[in-house]
Amino acid sequence: MKNVLFVVTTNENMGDLAFCLEWTKELGQQEYQFAFVMDRSLDPYVPKNKKRFFYAPQTDVKETILQGAKDFEADVLTFATGSCWKIQGQTGAKPGRFIQEVLSLNIPILSFDPFEGYEHHPPPQTVIKLRDSPNHSTASDVLHYNIPSRFNKLNKTQKSKTLESLGLDPSLPHILFPISQATRDLRLKVFSNYYAHLAHLFESCSDLPFQFVVIGPNKIKALDSLPNVHQIGEQPFADYLKILRSMNLVLTDYGMSAGLFYAACSGIPAGLLCNPTAAAQPIAHPVGRDPRNEVNGWETFKKELQLDRPQVEMIEPLLNQLKDEFVRLCLQNTKDCGPSPLEHLAGLMQKTHNPDHSAVRIEFMNYLTNQKLLNSDLTFLDKSLQNENRILQQILQQLTWQQRKCFRASNTKSLLDIQTGYDPFDELLYEKLAAAQARSKSASPRRVKFIQDNVEDGIPGTLVDFFQFIERRYHLEGYVQLVDIFDIKTFSSHLEELLSKTEVQRVQEKQRSFQTECEALLTPAAVLETVKKRPASPYEVIAYERPVHFIDVILDGIHRFLKALFY
């Protein structure tokens, strides 16, 4: 069993890919060969000596997987993970779909099982579920495994070299804050100013001798100007682990973050930002726009217009450019030297403790309509419409005739309403409101509704409930400390407690106990030997596809002809 093929079913987080990369490192290159079936966006994070088979957007994932298994002559196929497909715009990547045709390959089929059977659509019983926890299971289709290298640690010299390579001072304590693209998008759907609020928390620690290290796919604009925050881009898995093991504390806002688990393996204190108050009220969203409104969501917009990848890459920057232009416009003073529209709106929202969205929006629109730009006879609204019309024409040039028709029939009233996850206007407005509130001694703290009841489908309970499930899964109850994301007064002191010698000693004792439990589990090599001895299960397709008839071929040809003629 030499050729191991990994099938990665998502491009939205690095956790599933991390499972695969751990196995390749543990098994080694001398006895095994590895290949990956995956989305092309993951290419930079897979070592160059590994064979790749990329999904094509218009080709069903089933075809790519079966062809990859054939070309690679796979001896074993491992899903990461099961039926949890999350690849936007990819044909066949439907959440809950397990590619049952792989059973016809007559080779062992494995699947990582991080939810330990809590998936809505678990794989068939003929698929071996791989669990990396000490929880005992007597099920014949479950194998528990251990990665011994997870418990590797860095010595003081190795830590110093790693920190210096990132431009960090080794003499200071460092707090790692990892952000995945999927987590970032999830936060912004619930509250578009989330990272401005996070910047306010981090800034409250600016007088303390430690620094935040933020790892993510893109720099967070709200954090970029803070002197105690150092942002670096996404890292290959091996480099990420080296950075994490050089930290003094791992802090995250996601209950199933891999960072929490690797902190536990390395004996590093960890904290989870969460909302412990069920009654927390949302801050009034500027001008009444709700970023959760799927009608105006960017993903819905892409889906309705059926945009392909080149169109997305052209149109999304244009939408964000328009948002930047609107911000620059609203920062200008009026012709009679009055406050800018942004200052005017902030003033409106400060006058009442419970702003009425519709009243604020109407007053703000009246200001844009009636006030003129400095050194111009154009009103702010006139100039905004000019900018929007120019961007609209550029977007229409990227669309087919049918897509233009769909766009005109959509509910989009303004391009500014399309929520791409980038909203500089709201960020600036929130910062002004937060600054005004900090200056007012009598102001009651504004609380932001966090991800308490809006976790992803398939995960039971709230964010904290799910994290507690992760704790039980790894026998790590109490290892990670919960940190109130709303209490700015105690935030810095809470982090100091997590960095204390007492906390370090406590977590290291738990880490040694956890490592001992895991040492009793199978290594990846032992897992492959175990499944090699099992007889192949009979292949049975439960779901079937409708056969293609001759009339379908004719209709498809007519459709292609008309598309080429009119579009």
Image: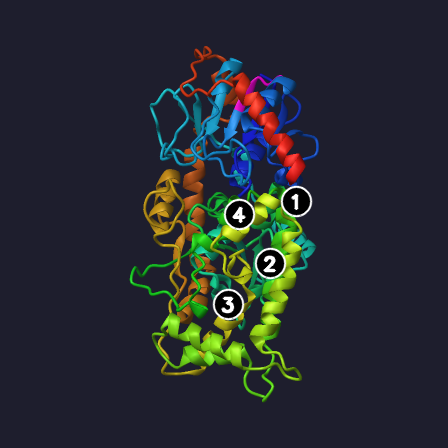
Please name the residue that numbered disc 2 is placed on.
319
Sequence-first tag of 4 and 1: 1
Residue named by callout 4: 406
Residue ID at (42%, 14%):
540
Please say whether residue 75 is one of the residues in the magenta stretch. yes
Q: How far apart are marks 4 and 1 (CA)?
A: 18 Å
Distance from the alpha carbon under mark 1 to that under mark 2: 15 Å
Residue 155 vertical position relative to residue 77 in the rendered view, above or below: below
Q: The magenta stretch spans which residues? A: 73-77
Q: Which residue lies furthest to the bottom in this view?
A: 336
Residue 230 located left or right of residue 538 = right
Q: Is the magenta stretch mostly helix, strand or loop?
A: loop
The label nearer to you, 4 versus 1, is 4
Residue 561: give x, y in percent of width and height.
64, 31
What colouring style does the render use? rainbow
Q: Report the residue marked by disc 3.
A: 426
Q: Quadrant of the C terminus?
A: top right
Above/below status of 96 relative to 306 = above
Across and down, in percent, residue 22 comes to 56, 34
Q: Is mark 4 on a helix, strand or loop?
A: helix
Nearest the viewer among 54 and 244 is: 54
